[in-house]
Image: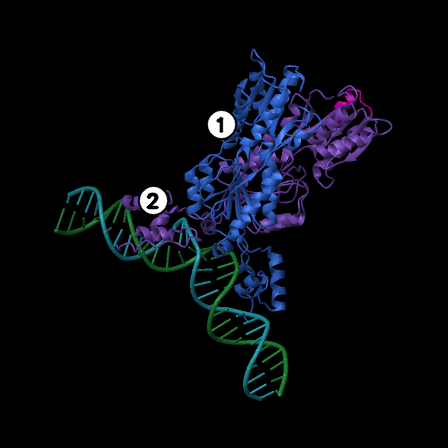
Chain colours: A blue, B purple, C green, D cyan
Amino acid sequence: MTTAPPAPVPPPSRRVTADDVARLAGVSRSAVSRTFTPGASVAADKRERILAVAEHLGYRPNSLAASLKSQSSNLVAIVTGNLGNHYDSVITAELVKRLADIGKWAVVLGDTSGDISNYDILDVLAYPLDAMIIRAGSIDEDTARKCMKLNVPLILSGRSTPMDGVDCVGCDNVGGARLATQELIRRGRTRIGYIGGIKSLTSEQERHDGFLSALSEAGLAPAALEWADFSFEGGHAAALRCLNRTTRPDALFCCNDIMAIGALNAARHALGLQVPEDLAVIGFDDIAMAGWPCFGLTTIRNSITNTVDTIMDLLESRFLHPDRAGETRCIDPILISRDTH
Amino acid sequence: MTTAPPAPVPPPSRRVTADDVARLAGVSRSAVSRTFTPGASVAADKRERILAVAEHLGYRPNSLAASLKSQSSNLVAIVTGNLGNHYDSVITAELVKRLADIGKWAVVLGDTSGDISNYDILDVLAYPLDAMIIRAGSIDEDTARKCMKLNVPLILSGRSTPMDGVDCVGCDNVGGARLATQELIRRGRTRIGYIGGIKSLTSEQERHDGFLSALSEAGLAPAALEWADFSFEGGHAAALRCLNRTTRPDALFCCNDIMAIGALNAARHALGLQVPEDLAVIGFDDIAMAGWPCFGLTTIRNSITNTVDTIMDLLESRFLHPDRAGETRCIDPILISRDTH
DNA sequence: GGTTAATTTGCACATGTGTGCAATATGTGA
DNA sequence: TCACATATTGCACACATGTGCAAATTAACC
């Protein structure tokens, strides 16, 4: 065996490489690589020396270089509309955790506005992602096609209508909205208003449809229609616009919980109304906050656990069968009856 | 120029590569690479043909392969304790957005528990990260050293005490806690209790210290000491433990806003107390929720904007001067006076 | 057309890994 | 000691890209 050359100090601006370790330990680079490959064959004493040198230099194999060959980067992109939004942030957190469990890393995209720019989505496709999970029903068909051409499996969450070649998972928004609206009607409310979310998202469109259909089936017309941005402040302002009309609604169905809670605040604190006596409020999602004693918000549960389970299920099945057809799974929403209606 | 061979269909399980484009367009791979490199020299008609073929095949240069050579992956890891926690999720969202502005992608780590396992941190270092931002004061000195050996700049957020060779940014937790406690004393409260967070985190330790020092300066002893996990439920339960003592505290200082809001709920809805008449409550952070009409929580502002600005500033300065010494920046907390004290 | 300058092009290398393959070293049994 | 089986080792390639360099082509000008 050749003697090790005088330990060359790697330039401090470079990452320690397997070559550095090999040189310092006086072995071949292959030996270093095998030392870090479970099951590979290296002599015990040599492995020990290599591990010591690696520890000393702080060496770790560069996954990125490895993934060039292995064709799997273990990176999964999560695109979310608004991380400031509680529902989105919790679902993202759950996904991050579950991805980590199967050895994948989450590259998270999403600003604090609400709409997703396709520009960012295309940019991150420069990385050879193992998959891409998009939180939001509305996505360009064109963007989806580009994902497929790059062999990046796509999962759309928050969408319950099928899309060619793409896995989708979402709750039955129309059904959920109908559930809420029918419940208000059943309890005798007749002047029911609607506070919608960002109009370009399918969740808003579908919940809006459900609201209108349930209403018209009962021979009623909407008492008010307002839209906001799925935020507390937006819901608060929209509720004020609804409730300051000459004939005040006696109920509000809100497109998500945060807006419902904003509406609740507007009704109680800005207008001094009693809930549910003067006004009934129903939300959508059932975020943790909805169950807090101070709110006790009646809502439609859009189960995060079920959604994340389903996403992970679709993902793993996609890894096993890359060429299977796109699948759409629907999560059943249920009414969670609390104190605001 | 040689004629293009009969368009070879790339195996569908492989990502489209520059070679594929070159072959189909009948040009060299270099030409393809130059076409996607701003400022490089390619004949106009050839570039056009290449772009057409690339569009047809859905080709994008693989950043990951490129970063092997360029020594910059444009990936920045964000390690956060608990994405379910509102403060953490908002700061993460802000960071994701600001990183995107400078062309970096965020790899987000963090489960929904609370404490960070060093195991995960070391694992993600397998990637040649451009930097790593850790949300939490408590991190192994050893882990920090490993980052430095791998030339991954480290930024600790939520820590205001210096650490060798590492950039830190945090608010003055001791000062903030003193501010809150002194305000309670000034308003005549004498039986002041404390609800702390996860004991292993420096933010908890420092706020605890500040609370005790302000109290003892005024010749007072704590009326109650309880700890929870920075969550609503934890704060709720801890408040009940505090308030069910024989001599009930007349004020609570809570280590963060969410626990304070939990305490508020416990006081009002479980025990029927009037806030602030029967009980004063002050939180820490000033999350958006604290300003909602239903809470009007008095709190210590731990400015997210300032924190994120500072993190980005440290980050960019680190990119420019990789070898400068570690720096610690402190953010001044201020009292936000609302309705709960 | 001839000379020179400018542009374009392809080759070849470097980036850090994992691994098949053949060669070598080591161990085992008679 | 020899024959044979097994364990270990190093070479060389593949992965997808960007780029320096020299050769080749084109443009410009007289």
Which chain hosts label 2?
Answer: B
Q: Is residue A30 magenta?
A: no
Q: Amino acid at mark 1?
A: Lys
Q: Position of residue A310 (x, y in %)?
A: 57, 43
Does A105 appear above or below A52?
above
* Residue A258 in view (yes/no): no
In the rendered view, does B39 fall on the left or right side of B99?
left
Magenta segment's dominant SS is helix
In the rendered view, does B172 fall on the left or right side of A8?
right
The quadrant of the image that shows the C terminus of chain A is top right
The residue pinned by badge 1 equals A199
Asked where in the image residue A286 lies, by quadrant, the reply is: top right
Which chain hosts label 1?
Answer: A
Number of on-image labels: 2
Q: Position of residue B151 (x, y in %)?
A: 56, 49
Does A216 appear above or below A330?
above
The residue pinned by badge 2 equals B51
The quadrant of the image that shows the N terminus of chain A is bottom right
- Magenta residues, start to end: B181-190
Q: CA distance from mark 2 to mark 1?
A: 35 Å
Disc 1 on helix, strand or loop?
loop
Disc 2 on helix, strand or loop?
helix
Q: Amino acid at mark 2?
A: Leu
Asked where in the image residue A106 lies, by quadrant, the reply is: top right
In the rendered view, does B5 fall on the left or right side of B152?
left
Same-subunit check for callouts 2 and 1: no
Name the residue nearer the viewer: A219 or A49: A219
Does A207 appear above or below D20?
above
